[in-house]
Amino acid sequence: MLTDAETLQSTPTSEAPKFGEFDVTRAAQETATPANTPAIALDPQAELARTMNVYQEPEVRVETKISQEHFQFVIHAGRNLRAARNHITGV
Amino acid sequence: MKSFFQQIVALITGEPAPTAGFKSLTERDLIRMESQIGAKLFGPVPQGHRREFFCLDEHTWVWYEEWLDPATKKKQNVTTRYEVHENGILKVQDGQPYQVVEGDELRNLVTAIQLYYEQVARHIYHYDPATGKPLHPQPGTIKK
């Protein structure tokens, strides 16, 4: 007859979950893509470019908006020039 | 004897300076003086051309170019008005639709305005554009 200690030692290790050990089988099940999940939609043009190794020209950005700093400067300059003129003409 | 100011006016404008002194200048006279500086900001003016570039008011800058057409022997001219708005600068030319100034033209215009203000403030109105203070003590002021 086995003692309690011997019973514990004879317990198959595969059935005893060990703390901190990664459960590969469970993780695989959790991360597996369900069969009914739709495929990720691809950008056909981007995919074609990747496939064909086509270089895509980066979009060239033309500045049309004056920066706030430059706008303030231009207005400031104009006001000061008018003030200087008015000072001389006596307006 | 001509005053220093009268000599400067004559030198810049090529015209006799008003004899009554500084106070007799009109706004038009001053703009003409400013424009002499403005015209040179873009490099030498081609032979036979007349160019003006000046600030009309805080929202308007003007470029005027005049030249003799060698084919027709007639004077041609183009006036371009730049309107400064918070979201961009518009270019207006005779008979042309409004255009948004963009890219290199926008950068060059802003640079020209900076140079214009710097030079006009110093050489015509004699004040430091950075501080707004006179470059030389006014006659009669007492130095502290």
Image (cartoon, coloured by chain):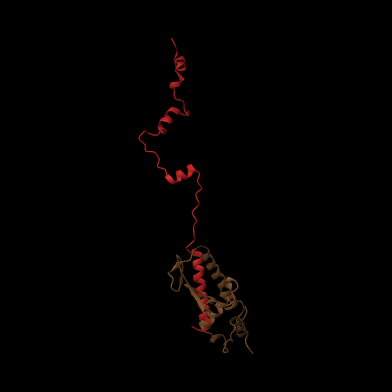
Chain colours: A red, B brown
Using residue A68 as the reference point, say whether residue B43 is left or right of it: right
Q: Position of residue B50 (x, y in %)?
A: 55, 77
Q: Quadrant of the N terminus of chain B?
A: bottom right
Q: Nearer the viewer, residue B104 or B87?
A: B104
Instruction: Determine if residue B58 is in view.
Output: no
Instruction: Determine if residue A26 is in view.
Output: yes
Q: Quadrant of residue B137?
A: bottom right
- State the residue at coordinates (51%, 68%): A73
Count of numbered circles on the image: 0
> Of all residues shown, which one is farthest toward the left?
A36
Q: Quadrant of residue B141?
A: bottom right
Q: Position of residue B41 (x, y in %)?
A: 58, 72
- State the residue at coordinates (60%, 85%): B6
Q: Position of residue A72 (x, y in %)?
A: 49, 68
Relative to B115, say whether B3 is above or below.
Answer: below
Q: Quadrant of the C terminus of chain B?
A: bottom right
